[in-house]
Image (tube, grey):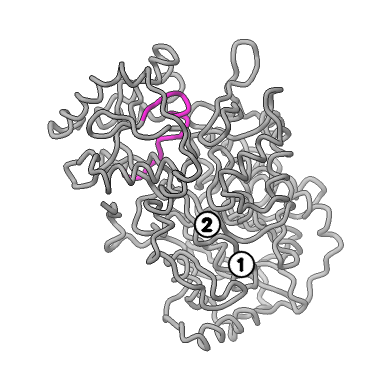
Amino acid sequence: MGYPQSMMESIGRLEASREKRLKQEIPLLTLEEKTQLLESFHPDYRPEVRRQIPAGVNKGEPGTSELVDLLEARSLIDPLTFDLDDLYASVDVLVVGGGGGGATAALFAGETGAKVLLATKLRFGDCNTTMAEGAINACTYPGDTPVRHYIDTMGAGGFTNVPAVVRALVEDSPTIIEWLEDLGVPFFRRPDGTYLRRPLGGGSTRARGHSVGDYTGMAIMHTLRDEVLNKGIEVMEFSPIAELVLDESGRCAGAILLNLETNGYLLIQSRVTILATGGIGRLHVQDFPTTNHYGATADGIVVAYRAGAELIHVDSIQFHPTGTCYPPQLMGLLVSETNRARGAQLVNVKGERFINELETRDIVASAIIREVMDRRNGVMTPVGSQGIWLDTAVIDIKNGEGFIKNYFRHLCHRFERYDIDFAKGPVLVYPSQHYQNGGVLIDNMGKTNIPGLYAVGEVSGGAHGRNRLGGNSLTDIFVFGKRAGVQAARTFKDIEVGELTLSHVVEYHKELTDAGRDSGKRSPLFLPDYRYEKALPRYHQ
């Protein structure tokens, strides 16, 4: 395939400007400039994209319209007729989600002899963790400190983060790297044995991003999956969560799962339940393409909210600046931030840089959208979408010939299939829906406001505020996966489960009816529907 002739003229201008751009320094924006850029061009600031939540704890607060659609839908379960005496299994700890957070929680929960069941929607390891190309943040060298990491995280989130949750994140990060490496994760190192780290966008130039090339998440997930299976922890695949179950005291007492192979419901009773169900990317907020895996449809948020869990920042979405824009077969797939950390430059149709590539993700994404929508400097593709060049060839110029082929093997292979040489650059990018900044509100141990219910990773909210710092998502899932798992192991023996009930679902349905918001729809969604307009997400240009 390669690039069509219609795009080659712009590539010529890019190549002609490369030598000049290598000498160019673009300063970071002032606070006033950042605020104006976000308010004018970031998708979160479009007034028509959010609605008020119609019922529940956060009634009247804003949420993204696609999520509110699910929150105002009725349960798949009929709470008045479902047989709560028909138990499929009773366990000490139920972990829902088969990504890095769920695997970590299951491992730590099982260390003291708890009977643990890990249930996952698809196959164990089909998750956003596996798709994480970038790095995991941790303070592992003397030039960095948890205090700096804390400040960077709070600053990236606009100081809307929950401070105690951020403190837990940054303080535990070094021990998480040690734990993962002890399990066998082969983090890249320099010849002298020190970690090969690099700074990521918004990180005050501190090199705290640890990686395994551009397949960091895959390497970690393979290791964790093997560890869970080797420990003998029971795993139920193709079993998404349909509803949480409470007991008569209001404590979370398990969940109802759907067996996707038989289409039958399975009731699991548990003393402690840990949600690690991931984010909402496959809802395609505002019809943006997404970097997320197929099962990211907000299931955990929906069932937790119906059970009475408090939400935070569910009107805030992170759009990764560099989702693939061409070829269309790769639409939305991530081109990792580590490329910009290694020197790749964002270049418009005229061959000009227009933003410091290591600003925070919300700023860089907004600048790209401005360049395309307002300044009309986007590069048009044959299918009618527009993007901005990411000049990846600069990486080898700055880091030495062959660096890209050695370090970004996955990306090189991905584009090679379409006759595009990633090492020689450029590749065309545009912001893609990447991360749900908010979620179920947790404390510094991963606890929600519902006794017996924890939330880990992207389903949770509090650590990232309204914009996640690059490299913190992997840190998040392992820190709070460990903390929730440890807490579950410490407490499960003291918990007695009372009579099971779905009265919370009955009450939620009544609230929807009283609010006049009975849409006739059902949720969770489980899997995205690509039969209609969602099949080809449109760009807002």
Report the magenta residues as a range.
331-345
What secondary structure is the stretch in magenta mostly built from?
A: loop
The outermost residue toward the right is 494
- Please say whether residue 492 is one of the residues in the magenta stretch: no
Does residue 232 appear anywhere in the picture? no
Q: Residue at x 72, y 44 (%)?
A: 167
Give x and y (percent) for residue 69: 44, 71
Front residue (pair 263, 79): 79
* CA–CA distance in space, label 2 to label 1: 16 Å
Which type of secondary structure does the marked residue at label 1 adopt? helix
Q: Residue 49: horizontal and vertical position, in percent?
A: 39, 64
Q: Residue 182, percent across and down?
A: 70, 29
Q: Is residue 276 above or below residue 156?
A: below
Q: Which residue is painted at 53% across and 66% down in the image?
A: 258
Return the residue found at the far left.
5
Q: Is residue 344 magenta?
A: yes
Q: Quadrant of residue 154?
A: top right
Give the labeled residue for mark 2. 121
Q: What is the three-letter code of the residue carrying label 2?
A: Lys
Of residues 293 and 142, the one drawn nearer to the viewer in this rendering: 142
- Between 253 and 356, the one lying in front of the other is 356
Task: Name the residue that disc number 1 marks.
Answer: 304
Q: Is residue 401 above or below residue 117?
A: above
